Image: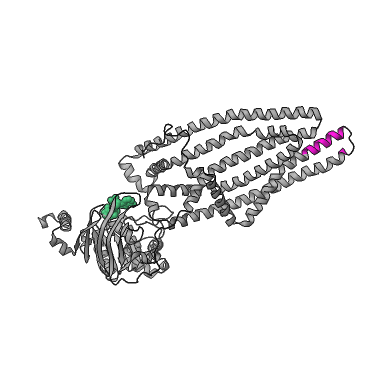
Amino acid sequence: MTDGPMTDHELPDQPAVPEEHRRLSRDLRYWALVLRSFWGLSPLRVSALVVATALTAAVPATGIWLTAQAVQAVVDAVLHVPGALDRLTPATAGLVALAVAEHVVSSMSQYLNSLLQLEFSAKIGEQVMVKGTRMDLSAYENPEAYDRLQRALRESGSGTAFEVFEEMMRTLTSLASLVTVSWVLFTWNTWIALAILLAPLPALAAHVVFSKQGYAIEYHRAQDRRRAFYYQDLTTTDTSYKEVKLYQLGPYFVDRYRALVQGFFRVDRSLARRRHGWSAALGLVSVACSAGALVFALRSTAGNGKLGELAGYLQALGAVHAAATGLLLGVATLYQNTLFTGNLFDYLSLPEGGITGGSRPFPRRLTHGIEFQDVTFRYPGTETTALDRLSCFIPADTCCALVGSNGAGKSTVVKLLARLYEPNSGRILIDGVPIEEYDTDDLQRNIGVVFQDFIRYEMPVRHNIGFGHLDDLGDDDRIRVAAQASGADEFVDQLPGRYDTTLGRRFEGGHQLSGGQWQKIALARAFLRDAPVAVLDEPTAAIDPEAEADIFGQLRTICSQATSLVVSHRFSTVRIADKILVVEGGRLIEEGSHEELLSLGGTYAYLFRLQADAYLPEATA
Ligand SMILES: Nc1ncnc2c1ncn2[C@@H]1O[C@H](COP(=O)(O)OP(=O)(O)OP(=O)(O)O)[C@@H](O)[C@H]1O
């Protein structure tokens, strides 16, 4: 994919709307999903809305008929036709009653609509969140899947699903209005009825065609839109500000953004030109048709003297135009919004968490250990082999270190152990039992992981640590003990609200921490978990040497109570491990204790000496 936006040249004449989206059956499925969602919110309100819709639909035809009756009664009264005034009174009363009823029903519909909209937007946001928690990690790490997720998120906030529901109701109303008005008109004169009914069609056909194209453009633009947002993000967030400023990257990102947005504009402008050109041209055909209907109606009335019907035709011209416009715009908007809403419902109906486990509870303490047997793994959608028949053993109640150069596969080992991915081949055994036999939730509850890119929750310290074990959120003692273990207690005690101080800058009163302090908080979170398996991916990277020494002491304590895996580039951390596993290119190349590996004189010894020399050049000279 190039970095430039889609240009006019790349835009196909017949846009490549994905095949799936062309199918009516698919749209019907989305409509059914929309209806089911709204019905689920409140069957009573939806039923009331359907009744209101039916009543609204009957208004134009009733109005036309009553107007014709009233006008004819007036004409007859002027001509002194007997009984004319008797017909005028009920027709007038009917028109008044109709106006009142229309007002009441329309107010009620608006109220019901706004309630449903509020309920739906609250509910759908929650559903998207819940779904996000149930998706596999691959949905976040694979660009295509991530795009889909972003589109769904956009739809959940944009209200298009509600518009689909609203349009469905409006389309039904317009359709029913057209049918009832046609019925009245056809009873008067077939040709006039046909002319009136067909008049709006040409002008609106263009809208349907161009809505499809509009959608196709947006659909294919998803990546570029995301890129544009990304450039915006880089120039407007606190985390990127310093580097963007000092490297003077601002103008570059603005230029990239501008190039993308101008590309969007060019394509949109071209579409707008064609859309409006065609609409104007076809609109003329509609105007001609309406004029023809008017001429017919006038001539016919001149012949038969039915002025009541003429009044009905004149009113019908407006009513049919409104209903047909409502219908076709409704269908076009419905079509477009259905496609967008499809993103949301497709996402909500994606298969959840392909990684399923068995029912075996995870052991409270390992007795044998963790074993990778010939494990091979490729990230979904890639050809790179991240782990290549990796075999290694982490004995129970020991502290193992995983070392290797960048991209060697260390974090991938952590992800497989935490069941965020499944190996393509090979087995992972925990206490001799294949990992997939354990209940996945239980397994994940029993692994305390500190990821390299741990989360900095912009919430109080208590939550930042308490999230390690939610049940302990209110247990001050346990939270403090965990903070002591990671060395976080010292600076937390200096914070204005201590454990209730909000961290980060996003929210009012927030207190920003240094990188190392955040890391200590993340460690405290893992310590609180008190899990039988502890995995620390670069646990001390941002921590000062003094604190590091303290944390090592704690790590030793943890290691004596849990089976631990420490991923680190710092050999001062690594050397405390009982066993060190050296990986390269996704394979285990060396293993043993620090001393054993040093005497082996292989990769580990080389890397260790490299680092030690950097610290103590004279000592090792
Ligand atoms: N989400 C991903 N999608 C595709 N490939 C990935 C993904 N994450 C890692 N890889 C690839 O898998 C291989 C192993 O990556 P991994 O992150 O496990 O290395 P690592 O040893 O932890 O590296 P580092 O020391 O830099 O953290 C690398 O070739 C990397 O490019």
Which image quarter: residue 465?
bottom left
Q: Looking at the rendering, in which quadrant would you find the C terminus?
A: bottom left
Question: Is 312 situated above or below 101?
Answer: above
Q: Nearer the viewer, residue 119 or 163?
A: 163
Residue 159, can we see it? no
Q: Is 597 positioned to the left or the right of 412 in the image? A: left
Q: Main secondary structure of the magenta part?
A: helix
Instruction: Find the residue positioned furthest to the left.
Output: 621
The residue lying at 63 percent from left, 53 percent from top is: 46
Please give the name of the residue rendered at 65% of the width and 34% of the height, measured from the top-left corner: 198
Q: Nearer the viewer, residue 114 or 218?
A: 218
What range of the chain is rendered magenta? Answer: 67-84
Q: Position of residue 187 (x, y in %)?
A: 76, 38
Q: Is residue 175 magenta?
A: no
Q: Is residue 249 left or right of residue 52?
A: left
Quadrant including the N terminus: top left
Residue toward you, 207 or 375: 375
Please give the count of numbered marks on the rendered protein.
Answer: 0
The part of the image, by quadrant, that contains residue 11 is top left
The x, y position of residue 457, in whole percent, is 39, 57
Report x, y in % for residue 314. 73, 33
Residue 151: image location, x then y, percent: 46, 47
- Its colouring scheme is one colour
Q: Is residue 14 left or right of residue 598?
A: right
Residue closer to the observer: 117 or 304: 304
The answer to whether residue 57 of the structure is visible from this angle is yes
Q: Is residue 582 above or below residue 284?
A: below
